[in-house]
Amino acid sequence: MEKKVQAIIDLLKQRYPESQCALHYKKDYELMISVRLSAQCTDARVNQVTPALFAEFPTLEAMANAPIERVEELVRSCGFYKHKARDIVLACQMLLSDYGGKVPGTMEELLQLPGVGRKTANLLLGDIYGVPGSVVCDTHCIRICGRLGLTVGKEPEKVERQLRAILPPEESSDFCHRLVMFGREVCTARSPKCSECPLSPFCSTVTGQ
């Protein structure tokens, strides 16, 4: 398994030398907000919505004091906008009241924030703090790792545990970002481009094993 994992990592690195989060942000708390908005929504849509949101409420303090109804209007097109707007405002308030105005740097602290689950926490830890072993289990990660035989099942926490056991910690965050790019370009949920896939030798969909 170790050689297989390293071969997959190397092939993804060759295809995507630059691994980065697809969400646009300038401040750490803006990434937290963008990831919350991305639930059940595309990153492209989030990137269309956040410029107006961040322009109207340009500081953490402004966001923490934003009328939830106005945030709802600005993020409506992201879906589940009532829950998301409430979580965004409350999380920003908590950053100010409990964490000195900074996105905290531990899993335990991040999970205390409204709307922040393990996927969001892992992404924040990996992208903001460079914490080794940060595994972001989104739909692309779960689908592709299952097809490659790296993981079994579709429950995010179980997939995360399985990947933590086999990925080099220093590679895990970039690996997950590359999977997102690969999942959009090649290994799509429907009609994956198997004939042009560099990972096809490792894929059960292709090999039948």
Image: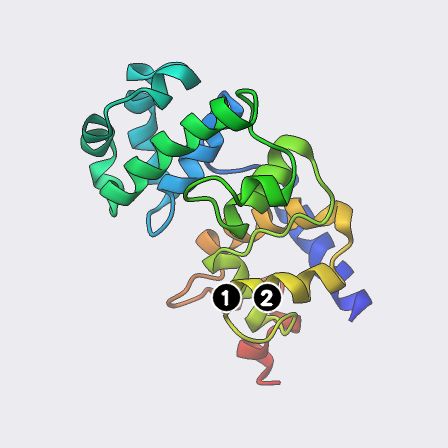
| Image coordinates for residue 171, horizontal then vertical, percent | 73, 48
Q: What residue do we see at 46% from left, 59% from top? A: 139
Measure the alpha-carbon separation of dots 1 and 2. 10 Å
Q: What residue do we see at 60% from left, 73% from top? A: 203
Quadrant occupied by the N terminus: bottom right
Instruction: Name the quadrant containing residue 89.
Output: top left
Q: Helix, strand or loop at disc 2?
A: helix
Q: Which residue is mark 2?
A: 159
| Image position of 193 (left or right of 177) | left
From the viewer's side, name the closer residue of 131 and 144. Answer: 131
Instruction: Name the quadrant containing residue 45.
Output: top left
- Mark 1 Cα-neighbour bin, 10 Å: few <14, some 14–19, many ≥20: many
What is the three-letter code of the residue carrying label 2? Val
Q: What residue do we see at 31% from left, 41% from top? A: 84
Q: What residue do we see at 28% from left, 44% from top? A: 83
Q: Is residue 190 above or below residue 21?
A: below
Quadrant occupied by the C terminus: bottom right
| Image coordinates for residue 64, horizontal then vertical, percent | 37, 22
From the viewer's side, name the closer residue of 79 and 45. Answer: 79
Q: Which residue is mark 1?
A: 143
